[in-house]
Image (spheres, grey):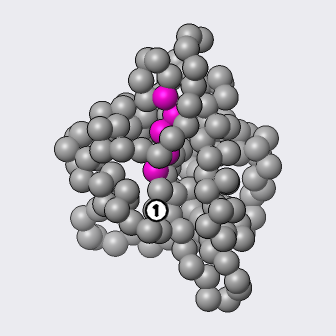
Amino acid sequence: MTGSTGVRQALPRDAAGIVLCLDALGYVSPCSDVVCRLQALIDSDLDEVFVCEKDEGIVGMASLHTIPLLHRPGYLVRITSLAVRPGFQRQGHGRRLLGAIENWSMAHGASRVEVTSGDHRPLAHRFYEMAGYAAEERRFMKHLNAMT
């Protein structure tokens, strides 16, 4: 492991590095699409994107969305993606990204943070459990025919 590692808010110029991270999760998108989505998230008061970088460039990324709650005080922060590039996993980058999300969430009045993870990702489930996240509730989803 060379150089120092830092987590910061993402910038549009980080799109190519974010693409590499999302590829690691199986989400393949052209860089131009990620640039557009990233800019929309950066411009939003309810969203945030963090990157973890080393001398080698962007090695991890995480995005979140803030949901105002009607039934209780505060907000729910949903982690919408968290990925660390192969070759950089198990080096603390994911924990650094989670820390940034949790600090941001507390500073913005969130009462809880949630993350969903596909059933086919048992290593991710272990990662979240080791970070203090517990499996709670059930999520029901209906896929619509709209373009996403």
Q: Mark 1 points at which residue?
A: 47
Q: Quadrant of the N terminus?
A: top right
Residue furthest to the left in view is 32
**Nearer-the-camera pick, 93 or 106:** 106
Left or right, 6 with respect to 24, comes to right
Q: What residue type is labelled 1?
A: Asp
Estimate the x, y position of residue 91 in percent, counting from the top left: 65, 23
Asked if residue 80 is among those painted magenta in the image, a careful observer would answer: no
Quadrant position of residue 89? top right
* Residue pictured at 56% horizontal, 56% vertical: 79
Residue furthest to the bottom in view is 71
User: Which SS class for mark 1?
Assistant: strand
* Residue pictured at 46% horizontal, 18% vertical: 55
Estimate the x, y position of residue 117 in percent, counting from the top left: 59, 51
Query: Would residue 27 be visible to someone looking at this image?
Result: no
The magenta stretch is 49-53
Instruction: Tell me if residue 58 comes above or below residue 111 in the rendering.
Output: above
Estimate the x, y position of residue 68 in percent, counting from the top left: 56, 79
Instruction: Tell me if residue 38 comes above or below residue 28 in the rendering.
Output: below
Left or right, 61 with respect to 119, comes to left
* Residue pictured at 72% horizontal, 71% vertical: 111
Estimate the x, y position of residue 78 in percent, counting from the top left: 57, 62
Left or right, 52 with respect to 147, comes to right
**Nearer-the-camera pick, 45 or 128:** 45
Q: In which quarter of the image is the C terminus?
A: bottom left
